[in-house]
Amino acid sequence: MSIAQHRPRLPLARIVEMNVGFFGLQFSFGLQQANMGPFYGILGASEAIMPLLWLAGPITGLVVQPIIGAMSDRTQSRYGRRTPYFLIGAVICSLCLLAMPYSPTLWVAASMLWLLDAGNNIAMEPYRAYVADRLASDQRPTGFLTQSAFTGLAQTLSYLSPSLLTAAIDRNALDPNGIPIVIRIAFVIGAILSITTIVYSVWRVPELPLSEEERAHIEESPLTAGATLREIGSAIRQMPRPMRQLALAMLCQWYAMFVYWQYIAFALSRSLYNTTDPGSEGFRSGILTAQQLGAFFNFIAFLAALALIPIVNRQGARSVHAACLAASGLAMLAIPNVGSPSLLYALMLGIGLGWAGMMGNTYVMLADSIPPERYGIYMGIFNMFIVIPMLIETLTMPLIYTPLLGGDSRNALMLAGMLMLLGAIATLFVSAGGKPRVR
């Protein structure tokens, strides 16, 4: 049974406004990506066990998103199907961002990350489904690539915010736990943005009211634990072929990106500042350099996502995404061999292009291959294609980091680059996202 509802076309300004909330969510993610590795290093973690401390993202995503996706498909409330979930998630995110920089020990910081990632995942999946619900099929590339653009813009500012704050605050000013004050203030800014941006989006572009057919379909499948688990199992068994084909490409690209986030600050501290000591000034310089480069590649992702809209509409998402991943892979391979910050900025062009594709093109391919009444559950299951690679990386990197990679974070980045190139090749074999037919 497929339920199709007429979706009124939205002007570009409304599509932008409906994705403002994604800005707040991605600002939170950007703070994690830029700062959790250095946090853990400052609190005493070794590089080899670093991936284990990032387990929160994969595990919470694996458990939370499919369940929340199935529940949001079946929810009826005065606020809509999706809205209650991303409002609750945003509140959790805000509270955790406020508390995170005050973590006195490694285990407290790791525990706080679990709660923060749970909040992010509660909000994230319904937000993807909300965009698919609200837009007509031919407007979804614009919707998801606008979402990708906000991802780039939010993470640009989240990566850059500690560096910008050094204009008024000493970069070496530390709290009693050794956490830079500029990072603590950046987390406060993230807490405010997490909730305010989502409230703005749902106020400006509320969900469409459910049709009678949709209400009847929801009432046939009540919001119970048993029904939710049965729906998840049924959806996995009936997964569309293009979605299955995306699994290998997603494995390669997300394993690679997780390695990049975990090790870029450590790699730059080695290659630019010749230090592996997390307590040194050189390491703090490496953190800021990594954040500045991260801000730049996310700004490139912001611009690239907007530029990709007409290209994807003409050429299809598949070939465009393969090119984006290839550019990112070549850049990751080159980073460990570059000793000049200016050249590193040039390489961020490739990283930014890949990130724009990962956050937009894959969802364009997905949305056109799944039934409308199952947007929530399939967006949640698709997130498993993100978090399972992260989970595999988390469990395998401690095993290979010393024997295969020589205990050197620069080699980890080169591994990430090779996986990105494999992901580009795998993308070309996906049956969805080809060149659109001429109408």
Image (spheres, grey):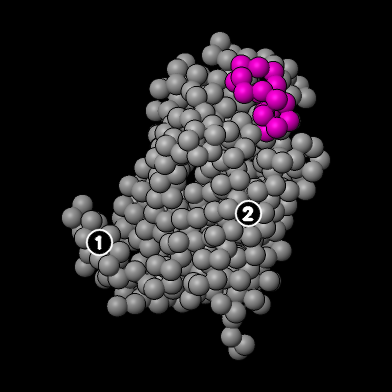
Task: State yes or no: discs 1 and 2 in contact (Cβ < 8 Å).
Answer: no
- Picture residue at 61% right of the left edge, 45% below the top: 414
Between 325 and 374, which is closer to the camera in this rendering? 325
Q: Secondary structure at mark 2?
A: helix
Q: Which region is colored magenta?
A: 268-286
Q: Count numbered badges in the picture.
A: 2
Amino acid carrying label 1: it is Gly
Is 189 situated left or right of 102 in this image?
right
Q: Residue furthest top?
A: 176
Q: Residues within 10 Å of mark 2 (few under 14, many from 20)?
A: many
Is 218 situated left or right of 388 in this image?
left
Between 130 and 101, which is closer to the camera in this rendering? 101
Q: Residue furthest left?
A: 226
Kindly identify which numbered label has been placed on residue 258: none
Give x and y (percent) for residue 86.
Answer: 44, 48
* Gap in angstroms between the C-alphas marked 1 and 2: 35 Å
Residue 323 highlighted magenta (yes or no): no
Mark in the foreground, 1 or 2: 2
- Picture residue at 25% right of the left edge, 61% below the top: 233
Kindly identify which numbered label has been placed on residue 329: 2
In the picture, residue 234 is in which quadrant?
A: bottom left
In the picture, residue 305 is in which quadrant?
A: bottom right
Query: Compared with residue 112, is residue 137 higher up or lower down, i.e. above or below?
Result: below
Q: Residue furthest bottom?
A: 439
